[in-house]
Every structure is written in C-alpha cells, then in structure tokens.
C-alpha cells in the first residue's frame, strides 16, 4: 500500500511532531511519572488542531471532553470581556473535562495562530482499562493539579474579598 499523504489520518500528528508533543506533555504535572513509551502511545491517538487569531477553541458553557496542550502560539482564557490568563506553548488548560462532563467555566480564544493537541476523556478511560497503574497515575496527577488551581483561586477570591471590606480606619456615613 502506498504511503501517500492522501491516505494518512489528518488528525494525527506527523511523526516528527510526535516527539515534541510527548516532550511537552511529559513536562506537565499531568504526565509526571508516565513512561515515554506510554506517552508516545497516547500521543499517537491525540488530535492536533490549528486555530487562527481570535478563533474560539471552546466557549464558556460548552460541555468539555478533554484537556488542551498548546504546541505553538498563545491562548487567552476569558470570562465575559475579562482576560483571566494568557497561556503559552507547553501550557495546558481545560483539565477538569478529563474527569467530569461539565460546562466549561471560561472561553479559550486563540491569540495569533495556534496549534493545540487534545487529550480526551475516552483516551484516559481507555488507558485506565488497558494500563490501570499509568491511568491511575494520571488521575492522581489531575487531582493534584485541580487542587492546586482551586487553592490559587480560593486565595485570589479571599484577597479580593478582603480588599472589598472596609478597613478599621475607614469611616462610612450611614443615613
């Protein structure tokens, strides 16, 4: 059979890109303790997508099915008109969707030309059944990532709440 590009799966990353994607995933806390072999196997099944400037990767309220890793470019995470974060190459977002089927809490917008690879919940579920230890390790890593992000969010909300409270020296006139 011919190896014509016409017959290749357009959603799978080209061979030379697979190692780069694997290296990026292995540098994330989600893939801590995962073997190179297992990572390469997962990457072989991951979908790579390209987005143009200002194109939505997903919108707040969409039901998520997986997490995204930025291969190239940057992504802005927004809520309403407010930019919450700007993510760069090697950053990942949307990891809650690997664990639960729930609406996205923010919108992700391509900031310039962007390439993203997705790790989807069905891939994680398959890993859990085929290689339970590796799957459990990713689940444990996800729990740590989500706990850390929740802690950061709580600290931010607490700081915002403290700043909104009147200080002991403030005087307010009540009619």
Image: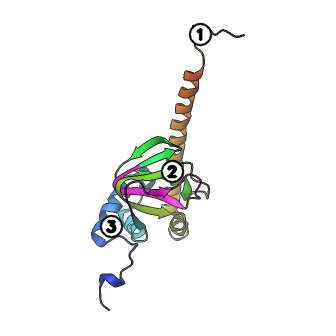
Name the image colouring.
rainbow
Q: Residues within 10 Å of mark 3 (few under 14, many from 20)?
A: some
Local crowd size for mark 1, using a 10 Å CA cut-off: few (<14), some (14–19), many (≥20)? few
Q: Nearer the viewer, mark 1 or mark 3?
A: 1
Element type at marker 2? strand
Q: Residue furthest right?
A: 175
Residue 30: image x %, image y %? Answer: 45, 53
Residue at the far left in the pictured view: 16
In the shown orientation, is residue 39 left or right of residue 99?
left
The answer to which of 162 and 58 lies nearer the viewer is: 58
Give the Cα distance between marks 2 and 1.
Answer: 39 Å
Along the horizontal axis of the image, is 90 left or right of 125? left
Of the pair 23 and 12, the residue shown nearer to us: 12
Q: Position of residue 152 (x, y in %)?
A: 51, 36
Q: What residue sits 55% from the left and 66% below the top?
A: 125
Residue 9 at least partly seen: yes
Residue 68 found in image quarter? bottom left
Q: Is residue 131 above or below residue 57?
A: below
Q: As drawn, is 111 to the left or to the right of 63?
A: left
Whether pointer 2 and pointer 1 mark residues with C-beta atoms closer than 8 Å, the reply is no
Say which quadrant the C terminus sits in.
top right
Residue closest to the eye, 61 or 88: 61
Q: Which mark is residue 18?
A: 3
Which residue is painted at 47% across and 52% down in the image? Answer: 108
Mark 1 = which residue? 168
Badge 2: few (under 14), some or many (20 or more) residues near its Cα, within 10 Å?
many
- The residue indicated by pointer 2 is 107
Give SS at disc 1. loop
Question: Which mark sits nearer the N-terminus, 2 or 1?
Answer: 2
**Sequence order check, earlier mark of 1 and 3:** 3
Per the model, the C-alpha gap separating discs 1 and 3 is 58 Å
Magenta range: 50-75
């Amino acid at each position: 059979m011919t190896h014509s590009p016409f017959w290749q799966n357009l959603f799978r990353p080209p061979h030379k890109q697979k190692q780069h994607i694997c290296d990026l995933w292995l540098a994330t806390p989600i893939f801590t303790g995962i073997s190179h072999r297992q990572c390469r196997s997962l990457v072989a099944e991951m979908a790579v997508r390209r987005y143009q400037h200002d194109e939505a990767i997903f919108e707040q309220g969409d039901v998520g099915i997986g997490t995204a890793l930025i291969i190239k470019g940057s992504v802005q995470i927004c809520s309403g008109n407010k930019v919450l974060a700007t993510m760069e190459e090697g950053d990942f977002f949307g990891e809650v969707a690997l664990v639960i089927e729930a609406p996205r809490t923010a919108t992700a917008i391509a900031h310039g030309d962007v390439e993203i690879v997705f790790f989807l919940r069905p891939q994680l579920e398959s890993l859990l059944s085929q290689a339970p230890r590796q799957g459990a390790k990713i689940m444990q890593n996800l729990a740590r990532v989500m706990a850390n992000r929740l802690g950061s969010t709580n600290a931010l909300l607490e700081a915002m709440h403290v700043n909104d409270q009147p200080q002991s020296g403030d005087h307010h006139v009540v009619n």
